[in-house]
Image (cartoon, rainbow, N blue to C red):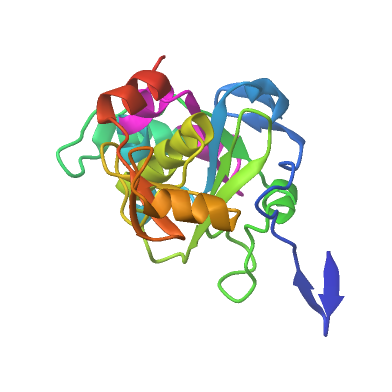
């Protein structure tokens, strides 16, 4: 943490960093993060406040999709700077009263962290003073089974998240890890994947000859087919 002209700034964990550790009280009991999730992917996400409409729509959507994320070996963990009793009351209200986008009677079963002190939010750079000094922005951290930050997305307070993109990013990163490939713009399972650029003139020439089932637009831009069923079979094992 650094102070410049009486303005606190908090560093954001970078891609490739070890996820900052913490022990926290949640709506599902105490958690030791990320140790309790070793061997699994985790999406750690923050929201500004309980009993707010955009956050309510997001929690209902995440809860509705929780089983889908579980099948991809991914757990969900939420956070705001509100207290535990506020969290409990809000989640009960969601289940008992709120309807949104065809969803109703939604029970949030994943943990929601109490962070009144803002210590965890500060560790993860979720407090953006230019947006709010007392609320966490809509941050999303993708943390892999080894506890490493693999991706992060930040949204302003006013903008609800795109959950199709969050799920797509998760599956794409798992695909890259499993098959040693990269995924191009707008990739979904079943689309062609990208092969790393050639590391020598000989490999570049070989690729341009059309061998190994590659389709090369030029020596540095080669794609190949990757069967959708194979991808989903390898990733959706749970």
- In the image, 115 versus 138, the foreground residue is 138
Q: Residue at x 68, y 33 (%)?
A: 147
Question: Does the magenta run of residues contain 61?
Answer: no
Q: Residue at x 35, y 23 (%)?
A: 67
Asked if 122 appears above or below 227 in the picture, the reply is: below
Tell me if 38 is positioned left or right of 110 in this view. right
In magenta, the rendered stretch is: 65-88
From this viewpoint, which residue is outermost toward the bottom?
5
State the count of labels: 0
Residue 117 visible in rendering: yes
- Residue 145 appears at what percent x and percent y? 62, 28
Residue 52 visible in rendering: no
Asked if 30 appears above or below 164 in the picture, the reply is: above
- Residue 195 appears at what percent x and percent y? 45, 47
User: Quarter of the image containing the N terminus?
Assistant: bottom right
- Residue 104 appears at what percent x and percent y? 21, 32
User: Quarter of the image containing the C terminus?
Assistant: top left
Tell me if 236 is positioned left or right of 116 in this view. left
Asked if 185 appears above or below 238 in the picture, the reply is: below
**Which image quadrant is residue 129 in?**
bottom right
């Amino acid at each position: 943490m650094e102070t410049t002209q009486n303005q606190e700034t908090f560093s954001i964990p970078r891609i490739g960093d070890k996820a900052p550790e913490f022990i926290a009280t949640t709506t599902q009991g105490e958690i030791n993060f990320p140790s309790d999730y070793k061997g699994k992917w985790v999406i750690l996400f923050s929201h500004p406040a309980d009993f707010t409409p955009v956050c309510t729509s997001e929690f209902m959507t995440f809860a509705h999709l929780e089983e889908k994320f579980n099948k991809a070996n991914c757990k969900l963990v939420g956070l705001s700077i509100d207290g535990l009793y506020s969290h409990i009351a809000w989640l009960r209200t969601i289940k008992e009263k709120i309807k949104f986008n065809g969803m109703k009677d939604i029970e949030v079963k994943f943990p929601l962290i109490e962070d009144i002190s803002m210590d965890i939010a500060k560790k993860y750079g979720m407090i953006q003073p230019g947006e709010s000094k007392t609320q966490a922005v809509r941050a999303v951290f993708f943390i892999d089974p080894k506890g490493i930050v693999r991706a992060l997305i930040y949204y302003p307070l006013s903008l609800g998240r795109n959950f199709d993109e969050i799920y797509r990013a998760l599956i794409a990163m798992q695909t890259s890890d499993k098959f040693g490939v990269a995924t191009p713009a707008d990739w979904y399972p079943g689309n062609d994947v990208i092969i790393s650029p050639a590391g020598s003139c000989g490999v570049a020439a070989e690729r341009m000859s059309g061998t190994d089932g590659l389709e090369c637009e030029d020596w540095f831009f080669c794609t190949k087919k990757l069967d959708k069923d194979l991808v989903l079979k390898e990733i959706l094992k749970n």
